[in-house]
Image: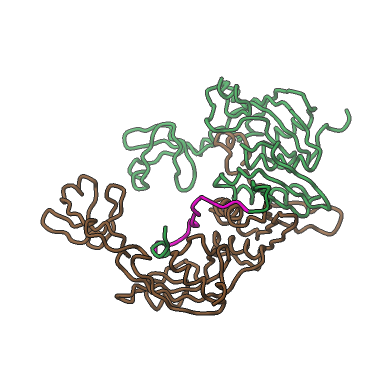
Chain colours: A green, B brown
Amino acid sequence: MGTMPFNEGDYILIDYIVKVKEDDRVIDTTIEEEAKKAGVYEEGKVYGPELVIIGEGWILKSAEEEIKKMNVGEEKTFEIPPEKAFGQRDPSKIRVVSIRDLQRRNIRPKINEIINFDGKPAIVKRIGSGRVILDFNHPLAGKTLVYTVKVVKKIEKTEDKIKELIRRRIHLIDLNKVNVTIEDHTATVLLPLDLLSYSNINLALRGIIRDIDRYIKEISAVKIIFEATFERETAEKPKKEEEKPEKPESKSASEKAATTE
Amino acid sequence: MGTMPFNEGDYILIDYIVKVKEDDRVIDTTIEEEAKKAGVYEEGKVYGPELVIIGEGWILKSAEEEIKKMNVGEEKTFEIPPEKAFGQRDPSKIRVVSIRDLQRRNIRPKINEIINFDGKPAIVKRIGSGRVILDFNHPLAGKTLVYTVKVVKKIEKTEDKIKELIRRRIHLIDLNKVNVTIEDHTATVLLPLDLLSYSNINLALRGIIRDIDRYIKEISAVKIIFEATFERETAEKPKKEEEKPEKPESKSASEKAATTE
């Protein structure tokens, strides 16, 4: 046996299906058809291979260890026992509380729902006469997980790593419209203008900048660029505008009163 | 008399106070102390000279005509009669409606408040037994306005015009932290990174791009840049990260279940 195919810090794209062994229930997948088949499809979620940086703990460490031994293109199914996943079930984490106690906290318990009790999530297991059984174990405690993983790709070029970090923050982005170049340890990222229709773009951009800072140490500066080009008449004379100018959104009512709009 | 100091398309910064002649009430001003003195100060509003492009109708045309005759640094007070401001009062725009009619529209009238009636704003003038008098005239109809205007500055350089268009959309911006350069009809705008804390920055940027398209015809493209630089150790070896990585905001609950967080 030689060295492992993947090492800490490697960027890989993986497709996976994660099931609970005992009931074959799918709890997570990157594959749209699998999600639909299992009845866990989420409207609006963007499915497709997911970026993992080996060693960063974005997925279970124990799953990472298995994936490190795989090759690009390989598909493998492996089990993760509870102690390497979400731990064994702890019977002492089951508590009986009075309905009155929950009422005081403005909680209306429903069977199998997760409530927040003293800042901790608990599943409502049973509701009896005046008493409720709460389970503070993680919903996946005691479960063996079955991973089916395919390593789709290894990302080698820094430009492509940056693109994947961008896609991680902006799932719907069309990476064909993103241009990344690197010169002198500075990454220049040209983003499509239509991202400005996306109201959380400021958060996404801050996240992308933070990610590049954290995960791409060979880059010491990043320039994020939005470029707009305007249709201009070829003649020398500038085109006369017909359109009414728009006032900035923040104009106050009193200012409006004194303008012609 | 020669040509007028200002022409259509000129960019000027003006300070002004607008009053209603008959009662000396201040209805609008760019000057913080004047707003405070008059009791119309608005918390959070950024006071200071306002950009006007002559001919764009951002302020009353009749006021623009007066301002065109002024020189930089000059202060002048002039009156705008109703017919050149918000028109004469039209007695036929006063209507009597029944309280029941307003109730059907879910309107609870209060004296001197503006209500929306059939999509038109109206001031509640009087509330009687079962009847309400509504005035659909503009609140400033019939009023002579007294403008006191000071032309603070004329903006000549295209770079500075772009900066002022930016400030118009992002009032709180520190223009000392904005860098605008022009080459080959392309404006490159370097914006401070802290603007990404501002949740409406996407709207502001779209507005700025639209404004440059509309008002600066000599520019045919604009690049908006956010630049981040990262602290890197000078040694060759990259610094080890202690901080826990943060998951993107959009991760679904089911995905979270299968990760170590």
Majority secondary structure of magenta residues: loop
> Where is residue A109 drawn, in percent x and y?
38, 37
Horizontal relation, residue B171 to residue B23: left or right? right
Q: Residue at x 61, y 34 (%)?
A: B258
Quarter holding the N terminus of chain B is bottom right
**Quarter of the rendering occupied by the C terminus of chain B:** top right
Q: In this view, does B125 lie to the left or right of B233?
A: left
Residue occupying image coordinates x 27% and y 60%: B113
Number of dots carrying numbers: 0
Q: Does the magenta stretch include residue A172?
A: no
One can see residue A210 in this view:
no
| Residue under the point 67% across and 63% down | B159
B207 lies left or right of A108: right
Q: Residue at x 67, y 39 (%)?
A: A167
Magenta-highlighted residues? A238-254
Splitting the image into 4 quarters, where does residue B194 fall?
bottom right
Inspect the magenta stretch and tell me whether residue A239 lies in it: yes
The one of A156 and B200 positioned closer to us in this rendering: B200
